[in-house]
Amino acid sequence: MSDVALPSTRSQKPTLRFMLSHPAHVISLGFGSGLAPFAPGTFGTLLGWFATRWLQPMMGDEVFFIGLVFGLIIGTWAAGVTGRALGASDHGSIVWDEVIAMALITALLPGAMWKQAWAFLLFRLLDIRKPGPIGWADRNVKGAFGVMLDDLIAAAMTLFIVALWIRVL
């Protein structure tokens, strides 16, 4: 399959046709959630949350976490392929990083949906604002690995803050 190239601009939104032109695009665009007309990162985060709530109980923890590692590796490759095709390594429509990060948060924060909802909001805030090490990774680590890394750091910070919040309250 050949990549369908788009102009090198972050304002250009990929289409369904573009997504379906290569398996890497399907993955990196979050099975279509990255095609959302607004806030694609939020839609990717929602996909990660709901997919984990559905898949983890069916798969069990061990298989789920092995799948998560596999998804991270394949997703890094897919983000690289799609970023090159779009002309922007961290194009806003590439949402697999949010999917994997929220899946990790949800899997490590089982139980009450209200805790996961707060973690969802906190993760989105950290991912958008990019404080401290998240911003450093976003600015300094380039390519597909960098696309994934800043969201993994945001997930780790989210889990740390939620753990402190649960412990203190």
Image (cartoon, helix red, strand yellow):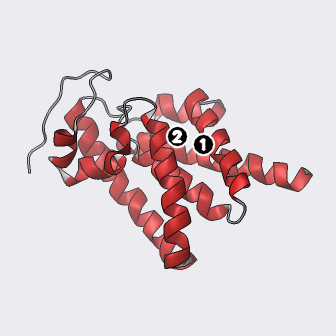
Q: Is residue 78 above or below residue 121?
A: below
Image quadrant assignment for residue 17: top left
Identify the residue at image location x=62%, y=35%. Answer: 126
Corner quadrant of residue 104: bottom right
Disc 2 and disc 1: Cα gap in Å? 6 Å
| Count of numbered labels shown in the rendering | 2
As shown in the figure, which amino acid type bears the numbered disc 1? Ala
Q: Residue at x 40, y 35 (%)?
A: 142
Q: Position of residue 79 (x, y in %)?
A: 32, 45
- Crowding near the residue tagged with mark 2, few <14, some 14–19, many ≥20 C-alpha atoms within 10 Å: many
Q: Are marks 2 and 1 in contact (CB under 8 Å)?
A: yes
Q: How far across and down, in percent of the image, does residue 140 sit?
A: 48, 31
Q: Pick the residue in front: 118 or 105.
A: 118
- 95 to the left or right of 65: left
Describe the element under mark 1 as helix, strand or loop: helix
| Residue 154, label in figure | 1
Q: Find residue 138 and report its horizontal and vertical position in percent.
A: 49, 32
130 on left or right of 97: right
Q: Amino acid at mark 2?
A: Asp
